[in-house]
Amino acid sequence: MVIAATIGEERKGDGAMSDEIRNRIRGCLLGGAAGDALGYAIEFRKEDQIFAKYGKTGITEYELDPKSGKAVISDDTQMVLFTANGLLYGDTRGALRGIQGPPCTYVAKAYEDWLLTQSMNYAEYGIMPEEQKKKRVSWLMDVPELFKRRAPGNTCLSALEQRRSEREVTDDYLRLPINTSKGCGGIMRVAPIALAYPKQNPEDIDIEAAQISAITHGHSLGYMPSAVLAHILQRIVFPEKEMSLKEIVLEAKAVTERLFRGDEHLNTLLMIIDRAVRLSENGDADLDN
């Protein structure tokens, strides 16, 4: 894929990245984690239950873990971290060996590591035979706190377990769907791909975001939205020209329409994007129109 061929050249210029851009990258990742930690406490509660416990404004402060005294992230942020680790692993391999595959292939390996953190504790991992540990690609495996089940999505778990058992090697997850899931477990973890390659063609990033989602979510409505999100994030963090958020969203829509032309579910996604834009301009807009 094009993205794998150009990463090495792109990395040579990273030293010139401004503090403002670095802060935007940190802000995206930390902001996502902060929102995740705030919402994790109410993830499975109904609206009336939330208002009954926290009042008419809902939850506005972190609900701290009684043991650690800290706000707790969910599986969403765990997988964001492993996505980032997979990208960094691929870049490191490319820098050291001079060859590098598409980012999604390394992210898939990192997700296998995340799967281990959901099935064992850190102590159990510590006594794992060294030959098995050498197969791991994620230095996040050295972080004991990540060996926690934080309501992981069943689709992510089952898809990764299936891929682990089949051991089928691919760099095109869109062509070989693992299932027909269109849940949010694919989009919630793809932000790092939009942040990792500032000089990369946005369309290549969009496709790679979809590929990363398709590792576990095979329905096109499970991975096409990730292309939209990645496009929006890259344009915000690495602006080539001044654009409003609406302009960025509409550009993302147009690019997605071109990239996935012919997909039977594309019009559903485009309709949802149009509806979101209308609602942003008029909070009283009719959801059915």
Image (cartoon, grey):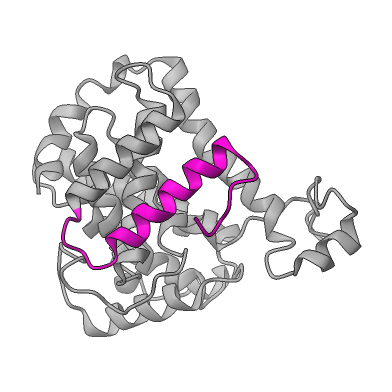
Q: Nearer the viewer, residue 22 or 253?
A: 253
Who's the residue at 41% across and 45% down the image? 191
* Left-right relation of 5 to 214: left
Q: Position of residue 207 (x, y in %)?
A: 22, 50
Residue 267 falls within the magenta-colored stretch: yes
Pick whichever, 243 or 237, lies toward us.
243
Residue 154: x and y in percent read 49, 78
Tally the numbered discs. 0
Q: Position of residue 142 (x, y in %)?
A: 48, 56
Residue under the point 39% across and 54% down:
271
Front-lying residue, 127 or 270: 270
On screen, 62 above or below 216? above
Q: Residue at x 23, y 84 (%)?
A: 166
* Residue 140 at least partly seen: no
With 89 as the anchor, is 126 left or right in this view? right
Is 176 colored magenta in this rendering? no
Q: Does residue 189 appear left or right of residue 283 in this picture?
A: left
Query: Where residue 216 appears, x then y in whole percent?
Result: 35, 70
Please indicate whether residue 106 sits to the left or right of residue 168 in the image: right
Residue 66 visible, this angle: yes
Q: Quadrant of residue 235?
A: top left
Q: Is residue 40 above or below residue 192?
A: below
- Tell me where residue 250 sits by quadrant: top left
Q: Give the extent of the magenta segment.
A: 260-289
Residue at 30% over, 47% down: 87
191 vs 115: above or below: above
Is 179 rendered above or below residue 6? Answer: below
Return the residue nearer the eye: 53 or 258. 258
